[in-house]
Image (tube, rainbow, N blue to C red):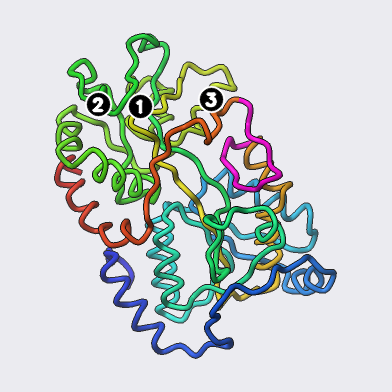
Amino acid sequence: MRGRKWSRRDLLKATAASAAGLVFAAPLRAAAPPPSTLTPELIAAATKEGKVSFYSALELNTAERLARSFEQKYPGISVRVERSGAERIFQRIAQEQGSGINAVDVANSTDPAHYLDWKKNDWLAAYVPEDVAKHFPADQVDPDGMHATACAWLEVIGYNTDQVKREDAPKSYADLLDPKWLGKIVKAHPGYSGAILTTTFVLARDLGWPYLEKLAQQRVMQVQSAADPPKKILLGERAIMADGNDYNLVLLKDQGKPVEVVYPAEGSPLIIVPSGIFRSAPNPNAARLFQSFLFSAETQQMLVDVFAHRSFHAQVKEKGEHVPLAKLKLLKADPAEVQAQSEAIKARYSKLFRV
C-alpha cells in the first residue's frame, strides 16, 4: 500500500470491502440518539484514557489551538493532531480502516462528501452534543447524529492593494478573464483541497466548464491548499487570487496587511467543515468529550474571534469585520453531487490547467 496513489474509486472499493468484513459493537441507528450532556462520569472516563487523536483539514495553527485549549480545559488528556489536506485525510483514513488500524478518534474535513463514504461504511459513531441539539440549525446536523458542521467559511476573490487599485479590482468571476490579469492570478487545486473541490464543482455547475477553460488561459499560478492563495497575494507573487479562504484575508487585514476581500457578484461558495467521531475510536470517551468541546459556545466563539471562521451556533456572535452570511449570495453544493463528480472534476481540471 505504501507509495501507491489512491483514487477515490480505489478507496471506495477498498473501504466497501473492508467494511463488509468488520463486526461492529453496536447496530446501525435508525435515528439520532438523544443529546448528550457533559457528565463527571464522561470526563473521568476520558481522563482515564488520557489522549485523543484528532485528524483535521483545518489549518495547522487552528487545529493546534483547538488541541491546546482542550488540554487546558481538561488536564490529563493530550491531543494528537494529524493535519493535512482533506483529500489526504480521506485517503489515510481509508487505508487505516482497510488495514484494521484504529487510530482516528475524531475527524473533520473540508469535503462533506467524505462523511457520506464514512457513514455508508458504518465507520462513524452517533453522538449529538447538547449544544448541537439546542443551538445548531437542522441543515447543519446529520439526521442520524453522525456528524455536524464545526465551522464554515467562504471561498472568495482577493487582491493585493499595493498592486491593484480598488476601482480596478475584479468584482466578479467574469472580471478575472480580463486580459490585464494575464499571469497575475493564483488559484488552489481541487486534487488537494476539499474546499477547492467544492468550489470547482460550484463554478463548473453555475458558470460552466467553458469559463474555467478561459480562466486556465490566464497563465494561473497553481498552489495546493485553499489557504495558499492569500499568502501568495500578500507576498506580492500574484496580484489577484481566484479562490481562497475569506478568513485568511480578514485576519491579514486585521494586521494592517495590504489585502482585500471580494465577494464575487455571482456568489461565494460556502465551505462547511463537518466533524464526527469514529466507531472504532481507540479513545471513545475522550472522543466524545472533544466533540462536545468543539461544539460548545466557548470554542465556537473562539473560532470566530481568533480565526475569523463562521459558526452556525445560535449563541455565537459574528466577527465584526465579516460581512454577515445573511447579506451575501451563497453558492451551496450538494455533497452527494460533489462525491459523484469528484474524480471527473479533478481529472478535467488537471488537464485544463496542465497540473
Say which of marks 1 and 3 sits in front: 1
- Spatial CA distance of label 1 from label 3 is 23 Å
| Residue in front for this viewpoint, 135 or 347 | 135
Q: What residue type is labelled 1?
A: Ala
Q: Where is residue 45 shown, x and y percent of the image?
A: 77, 74
Sequence-wise, the earlier of marks 1 and 3 is 3
- Secondary structure under the numbered disc 1 in the rendered image: loop
In the structure shown, which secondary structural element does the residue marked by tag 2 occupy? helix
Q: Residue 209: percent from the left, percent from the top?
A: 17, 42
Between 330 and 256, the residue placed more toward the observer is 330
Q: Which of 69 and 150 is in front in this view?
A: 150
Please state which amino acid type lies under the numbered disc 3. Answer: Leu
Residue 6 lies in magenta, yes or no?
A: no
Q: What stretch is highlighted in magenta?
A: 306-320
Q: Is residue 349 left or right of residue 250?
A: left
Quarter of the figure with the N terminus: bottom left
Residue 106: x and y in percent read 58, 64
Say whether residue 159 is left or right of residue 180. right
**Badge number at residue 84:** none
Counting other residues with Cα less than 10 Å from the Cα at mark 1, is it few (<14), some (14-19), or many (20 or more)?
some
Q: In the rendered image, which residue does mark 2 sit on?
A: 174
- Quarter-of-image position of residue 131: bottom right
The reply to whether dot 2 and dot 1 touch (C-beta < 8 Å) is yes
Earlier sequence position, callout 2 versus callout 1: 2
Look at mark 3 in the image and give the residue it sits on.
252
The residue at the point 47 percent across, 78 percent down is 122
Please, is residue 22 above or below residue 195 in the view? Answer: below
Asked whether residue 47 is in view, the answer is yes
The relative height of residue 233 versus residue 126 in the rendered view (above or below) is: above
Label 1 belongs to which residue?
Answer: 265
